Image (cartoon, grey):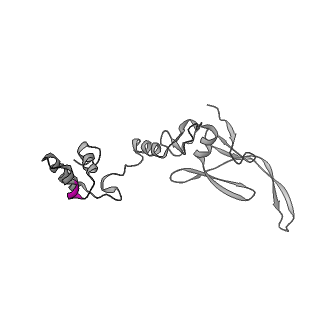
Amino acid sequence: MEEVWRPVLGYEQTHEVSNFGRVKSLPRRCVGVTPTGIPCTFPVRGRVLGPLATERYLRITLVVEGVPRSFLVHRLVAIAFVANPRNLPQVNHIDGIKHNNRSDNLEWCSASDNQNHAIALGLVKPIMGTRRPLAKLDDEKIRAIRIQLAAGVCQRQIARTFGVCESKITFIKQGKAWWHVT
């Protein structure tokens, strides 16, 4: 694949982004002020900019007329190269590698699609069981609920005993909730 450069949205006259995930500034003349306060113009050489590597995503700071603004590199690449006909809000790294910002590794997605993809790749653990902030049940209570279900106790009675809604007991019985507890 050949490297292709396109203007950065909102910075068309000053910066470009490539389908390889690189960002560069364009050669231009800038307005400044000398130490004595006299307005002047000076040349700025165009160059490929090095992104700031954080533990998660690559960031780049674009400075135009002295005003810095930080961007996620993968979003700049996706805006320039990846079609988004459904107007989805997030950009997903298909291979799960956050520093691989090539356009063929990016796709637009919903927040839930992004989270499910991360879980499927093993990048994050799903929040389930007692790890949920408002969990009313724990592993021991789930085992007790299953014993009562097996004994034929009414789901409504089990729900009252444990202080949860009846649908929660139904989900436990069907294996849709707390399936990870044996």
Rendered position, 144 above or below 119: below
Residue at 24% across / 49% down in the picture? 169
In the rendered structure, the answer to whether residue 22 lies left or right of residue 108 reads right
Residue 101: image x %, image y %? 57, 42
Instruction: Please check the rendered image and state whether residue 9 is part of the magenta-colored stretch, yes or no.
Output: no
Instruction: Please check the rendered image and state whether residue 162 is part of the magenta-colored stretch, yes or no.
Output: yes
Q: Nearer the viewer, residue 82 or 22?
A: 82
- Answer yes or no: is residue 4 visible: yes
Q: Nearer the viewer, residue 171 or 40?
A: 171
Residue at 63% across / 43% down in the picture? 22
Residue 105: image x %, image y %? 54, 37
Residue at 83% across / 55% down in the picture? 42
Magenta span of residues: 159-164
- Answer yes or no: is residue 21 visible: no
In the rendered structure, the answer to whether residue 37 lies left or right of residue 61 reads right
In the rendered structure, the answer to whether residue 152 lies left or right of residue 75 reads left
Query: Main structural element of the magenta stretch: helix, strand or loop?
Result: helix
Residue 74: image x %, image y %? 58, 45
Rendered position, 80 above or below 162: above
Number of numbered tags placed on the structure image: 0
Residue 16: image x %, image y %? 69, 43
Rendered position, 36 above or below 90: below
